[in-house]
Amino acid sequence: MTNVTIFGSGNMGSAIANLFTAGGAKVQQIGSDGVGTVTGEVVVLAVPYPALQQIVASHGDQLAGKVVVDISNPLDFSTFDSLVVPDGSSATAELAAALPSAKVLKAFNTNFAATLASKKIGDLTTTVLIAGDDESAKHALASLVTAGGLEAIDAGSLKRAHELEALGFLQLTLAASEKIDWTGGFGVIR
């Protein structure tokens, strides 16, 4: 049984917790107060981009050697019109630099909570795209995702987090402008 710690108990944190629990994992959730000791080998940061710095400051030493999954989309929430990371970079690259002893991955940022819960996007099984530089970490996360009933695709190296964040940004802006539903999104046909 894999032990997972999830920072965040909102829609995404809860949907990911339910997914992993359905697949047989033991899940610990740490809420917005940030109080708790990390017990999982896999740690999911299901928090908004600005909260990543606080988690690194308060729990960074506990994340060494762990698989750390960043689900954030670094949007400018005041305008909803741009990303706030430098061109060519990503929130996940910043996180990896701040946690050099962790195995940092990007995943779940192109999924909505409703599609994780229903396990469907239209008639397609929901697919989680995973980017990172550590193959064993990507395999561990993919195993958790598929055990919960979803599909997982290795999207490449950590450099691909840049494109995943752009895709997440596009999907969020489409949903916010009511051009797609929050229960929909981008599906993958293999």
Image (spheres, rainbow, N blue to C red):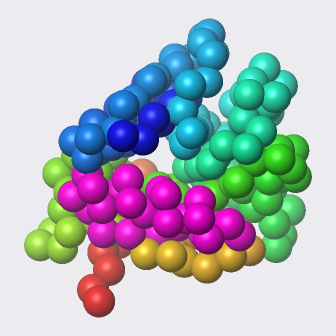
Residue 151: x and y in percent read: 30, 69
Q: Is residue 25 among the parts visible in the rendering?
A: yes
Is residue 138 on the magenta stretch?
yes
Single out the residue that lies furthest toward the left: 123
Where does the magenta region start and end? 129-152
Query: Residue shown at 56%/25% (left/top)?
Result: 39
Residue 74: x and y in percent read: 68, 50
Residue 3: x and y in percent read: 45, 35
Number of callouts: 0
Q: Is residue 94 left or right of residue 68?
A: right
Quadrant in which residue 145 is drawn: bottom left
Q: Is residue 50 among the parts visible in the rendering?
A: no
Look at the picture and state if 190 lies above or below 99: below
Quadrant of the frame with the C terminus: bottom left
Residue 122: x and y in percent read: 15, 69
Most foreground residue, 80 or 110: 110
Q: Is residue 109 left or right of residue 147?
A: right
Query: Residue shown at 22%/42% (left/top)?
Result: 22
Quadrant of the frame with the N terminus: top left
Query: Residue shown at 66%/43% (left/top)?
Result: 66
